Image: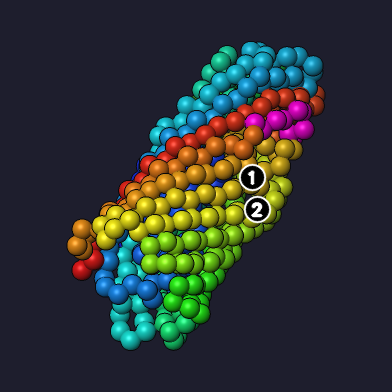
Amino acid sequence: MRKFLLPLLAFSLSSTALAGNVDTFGIGAKATALGGAFSAYADDPSAVYYNPAGLTQIEKPIVSVGAEYLVPTIKVHDYRAVDGDGNKVQPYGASFTDDSDALTVPYLGFATPVFGGLYFGVAAYVPYGLHIKWDSDPAKNPAAYNGFESYYVRGVVTPTLAFKLNDKWAFGFGISFGRSDAGTQRRIYAPSIPSIHNRIIKGDLHDDFNVSFNVGLLYKPYDNFSIGVTYRSRTNTNFRGTVEVVGVDKVGAETKIDHPDQLQVGLKYRPNKRLTLTADVVWTNWSLIHGYTVKFDRPLLGKTQEYFPRDWKDTRQLRLGIEYKWSEILTLRAGYFYDPSPIPDHTFDMLWPDADKKTYSVGAGLKFGRLRIDTVVQYIIAEYKREIGGESVNLNNSYPGVNGNPGTVATSADGHLWGYGLTVSYLF
């Protein structure tokens, strides 16, 4: 099984990352253009993620391939750090912007009727991902002592079966076989110990194989109205790799950062043959992430482990979509969703920068015989500037005094992201 999955996992992980918190901005251009309000629609191979039961709506074999190109911008304003001895960390009051690369998120899917009421689908995609980079020079970016690069990504392949129980009810179930990668880089703040001050601590950790599942129900009481319910399970992880103080020492390391489970419930209503309206609510169990401990196989700088508090909170996203069939060739789409941040002020840091976000999307679908082309443009913006006034434990602990007392950090941050997606599908 693992040998079979390796090529698809390589596809799903190649050049892959997301900005902001670890969650997808969309899988497949059609669903993304509708703001991800797709659990009651789910009529293409992306149903493997949005609602496996939706595969029962596919009448002919279909293959889809696509990607989304993301351009993030995060700005930090007036970063003021004072260490545990009361010394201002220079440059005091600095403002700076992230150096994150433009990011590509691929997607590949296939679905087909099998026989009777049985359907099959398989998709390779990225349900969670993040990659943030900042200037590593503390003379320009004093936050480099907290973190100047972090990444966290899971790529999966999800074979799925769906069953059409009758004209109104359908059920689907898929198993996601995945690989996860995580890593961070930061500078050491220790001006009283010149031998390690400004050294880089680098961590690279991997979970080569993990498993979760997606299960969905689709109910169509009327031809123009449907209800979708999807549950995506928690993923248990076991990360292993290395942590090193560059130029000093490297040790083996391990940790657990489980991927949270989600529940998505949605409605689809078609008041006439041209217009379709969708609405979904997505609950994510972020509160399972209280924190994580990176354990070393031998002491590093006198420590055998390092703990990172998180105390994340559950979120509920509201997603809305609208579709208008302009002609037999052209369909227009738009979407919106509100995404509250799970990260509280007291654990905010540069490794997981996030804020409450609003996402707006527009797109179009084109049909040319058996060929389908779907497009989307997204604009994601922080609802307001994130203000930190000294309460972040993670930021404060990055500037210890001689006796280990934490410092104090005050700053603010905001940002936006542009996304451009394309999915090409072919019906056999």
Whole-percent x, y for residue 36 in the image: 48, 55
Report, in whole angstroms, how far the alpha carbon at label 1 lies from the one at label 2.
Answer: 7 Å
Whole-percent x, y for residue 96 in the image: 56, 20
Picture layout, residue 226 above or below residue 388: below
Q: Secondary structure at mark 2?
A: strand
- Is residue 36 visible to us here? no
Name the residue nearer the viewer: 124 or 72.
72
Magenta extent: 385-393
Label 2 Cα neighbours within 10 Å, binned few <14 / some 14-19 / many ≥20: some
Q: Amino acid at mark 1?
A: Ser
Whole-percent x, y for residue 151 in the image: 50, 40
Residue 341's tag is: 1
Residue of label 2: 315
Residue at 65% across, 31% down:
385
Residue 191, by quadrant, is: top right
Picture layout, residue 294 above or below residue 166: above
Whole-percent x, y for residue 235 in the image: 55, 61
Q: Amino acid at mark 2?
A: Thr
- Is residue 266 visible to us here? yes
Residue at 33% across, 56% down:
326
Residue 377, by quadrant, is: top left
Label 1 Cα neighbours within 10 Å, binned few <14 / some 14-19 / many ≥20: many
Q: Are marks 1 and 2 in contact (CB under 8 Å)?
A: yes
Q: Is 97 on the left-hand or right-hand side of 63? A: right
